[in-house]
Amino acid sequence: MPLLVMKFGGTSVADLDRIKNAAMKVKREVERGYDVIVIVSAMSGKTNELVGWVEATSPLFDAREYDAVVASGENVTAGLMALTLQEMDVPARSWQGWQVPINTTAQHSSARFVDIPRKNIDTKFAEGMKVAVVAGFQGLSPEGRITTLGRGGSDTTAVAFAAAFDAERCDIYTDVDGVYTTDPRITSKARKLEKIAFEEMLELASLGAKVLQTRSVELAMRYKVRLRVLSSFEDTDEKSGTLVCDEDEIMESKVVNGVAYSREEAKITLVTVEDKPGISAAIFAPLAEAGVNVDMIVQNISEKDYDDHPGNVTDMTFSCPVNQVARAKKAMEEAKAAGHIAYDELVVDTEVAKVSVVGIGMRSHAGVAAHMFKALADENINIKVISTSEIKISVLIDRKYMELAVQALHDAFELEQA
Ligand code: ADP
Ligand code: ASP
Ligand code: MG
């Protein structure tokens, strides 16, 4: 039997009516002759509520118990989806991660797949089951504990199942009808893309576009999964939505194809650190150990011979998610107290956001950065930090200008027009 993976996100299973709506879509594919693996998220808002309960109970929580709690939202929707399908005369049953089993690493709250043995589910398909409904976002550690895959992880569950079961396609049903040039909630000028290259989707996701979890795109790219994003609220067919695919499947492409943003960023500067070999290692090793996800890094040009600082000195600036600032500060203060680093001041700016432009065309086009900076300058937006890679340029700016920056860049690169 040909097999499809269909994933339904939180808003698509937010209540019993929406679960019914999603189940109808599944039934239609069964009627077309497919066996289906359905991956479900928790009802929208549920995971946030569960995380809130954990944090209120235990601020420095044991990550194993965090996972035990937050994984539960998906268990409910998996069971309800199976029941709904049964009510529609579709032979279905639910599977929690440990029942499959979905084997992962023991990295609680951000576990990675190890393997997904097919045997249990294949046996049921062979016995006449048409739909396996699997709880997304969760797995089983080598120690036998429940793990979760990081926020948005059901996308990755879906792609991993598509790879493991050689699915014809992995369809990600969500509350937008595809991948857009930017978040359609930020500008109505955002344009739906018919196709997007894996590399671009990977950058957009990792730069903040939460329509797909970054890891899901990585897996799809590695295992050549045909990945599609489409609406669970509209009638859809094989041509609907956005296909994430190899770059050579795309005929027309612009230099810049998307604008992404990440709202909750912070910027930390260590003022007056010694400019000598080993200083970066001495700063960033303790940050890594503390689990701080450092993103952008800038080291100023060094200045010589302050009165009280013989030798070269410089400032070191880095960015990280705003909810990791306390951890970063603590790590720096401890490193300073232990004599591993020295600085005069630690300056924190928690009111910044990151805005990025992405496009594989940048590999062969000059002038993209200049065009981007000009567009921001025209809106009087000050750039605090810049970082670039082969196919993206990111800037850190005041958070209050984030929407304006996204709109200005969308206009400047004429993304509204195909
Ligand atoms: P789900 O609950 O289905 O997993 P998410 O909320 O995780 O859905 O992801 C869908 C959301 O991603 C959309 O509602 C949209 O606001 C946001 N989004 C951000 N960037 C983009 C983009 N470039 N294209 C489409 N949606 C985007
Ligand atoms: N329910 C989880 C979350 O909200 C996983 C997911 O929806 O993908 O992060
Ligand atoms: Mg999501």
Image (cartoon, grey):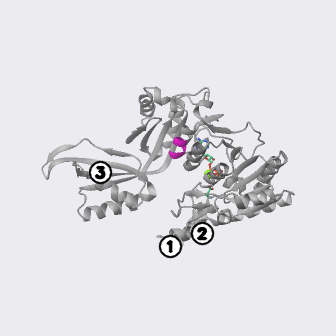
Mark 1 in CB contact with mark 2 (< 8 angstroms): no
Crowd rating for badge 2 (residues with CA inside 10 Å; few <14, some 14–19, many 20+) = some
Respond yes or no on whether mark 3 lies under 8 Å from ligand 1: no
At 40% from the left and 58% from the top, the residue drawn is: 325
- Residue sitting nearer the eye, 185 or 15: 15
Q: Which mark is on residue 58?
A: 1
Q: With 75 as the anchor, is 201 left or right in this view? A: left
- SS for callout 3: helix
Respond yes or no on whether mark 2 lies under 8 Å from ligand 2: no
Residue 97: x %, y % from top left: 65, 63
- SS for callout 2: helix
Answer with mark 3 or mark 1, whichever residue precedes in sequence: 1
Please give the residue where the numbered disc 2 appears in the rendered image: 69
At 55% from the left and 46% from the top, the residue drawn is: 218
Magenta extent? 202-206
The relative height of residue 146 versus residue 211 in the rendered view (above or below) is: below
Amino acid, disc 1: Ser
Residue 68: x %, y % from top left: 59, 69
Please give the residue where the numbered disc 3 appears in the rendered image: 280
Q: Which mark is on residue 230?
A: none
Crowd rating for badge 1 (residues with CA inside 10 Å; few <14, some 14–19, many 20+) = few
